[in-house]
Amino acid sequence: MSSSVLTIDVPEEVLWALNQNPDQFADEARLLLAVKLYESGRLGSGLAAQLAGVPRSTFIFLLGRYGLSAVGVDPEEIEKDFANALRASHPQ
C-alpha cells in the first residue's frame, strides 16, 4: 500500500494545551479525520480505519467514542474482522 505524507504546522501552544507530544497529536488527528470522513459518508469504515492506522474492527469500536455507529456494516464482516483481530493478538 502506498501512502502520501502531509505536513501541517501545529503551534506549540496547542500541543501544550492538549498535553501531547507531536506523535500523540498526529495519531489523534488521523483518527479524528478518519471519523469525520466516515461520518460524512466520504469514506467507508475500511478506508477510514486505514487512514486512522487501526484495524477495521478497532475503528468500528472507536466510533462509539464519538457517538457514531457502524450501522450499515455487514454483521458477517464485523465478525470476520473481530476474528482476525483475535487471531492477530493471540498467535498460535
Image (cartoon, grey):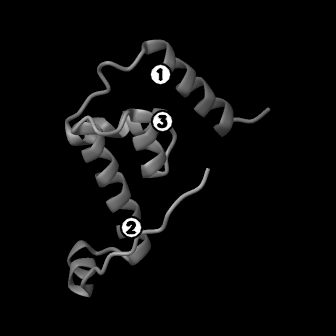
Q: Which residue is label 2 attached to?
A: 26
Q: Position of residue 17 (x, y in %)?
A: 20, 77
Q: Which mark is residue 40?
A: none
Label 1 with label 3: CB-CB less than 8 Å: no
- Tell me which amino acid carries mark 3: Arg
Is 60 drawn above or below residue 37 in the view shown? Answer: above
Comes first in the chain, label 2 or label 3? 2
Which residue type does callout 2 highlight? Ala
Q: Quadrant of residue 62?
A: top left
Choose the circle earlier in sequence order: 1 or 2. Answer: 2
Q: Quick one: 73 or 66, which is closer to the camera?
A: 73
Q: Residues within 10 Å of mark 3 (few under 14, many from 20)?
A: many
Residue for point 42% across, 50% down: 52
Q: Which residue is mark 3?
A: 56
Q: Is residue 31 above or below residue 4?
A: above
Count the marks. Answer: 3
- Which callout, 1 or 3, points at the residue further toward the start of the chain? 3
The answer to whether 75 is drawn above or below residue 48 in the figure is above
Find residue 29 and report its horizontal and vertical position in percent.
Answer: 32, 61
* Alpha carbon distance from label 2 to label 3: 19 Å
Q: Secondary structure at mark 3?
A: helix
Residue occupying the point 47% across, 32% down: 57
Residue at 22% x, 42% y is 66
Q: Position of residue 60 (x, y in %)?
A: 38, 33
Q: Which residue is mark 1?
A: 78
Classify the position of the C terminus by image quarter: top right
- Residue positioned 47% across, 21% down in the render: 78
Do the CB atoms of the residues marked 2 and 3 lie less than 8 Å apart?
no
- Classify mark 2: helix, strand or loop: helix
Residue neighbourhood size for the residue with mark 1, other residues' Cα within 10 Å, grouped as few (<14), some (14–19), many (≥20): some
Q: Quadrant of residue 23?
A: bottom left
Q: Quadrant of residue 85?
A: top right
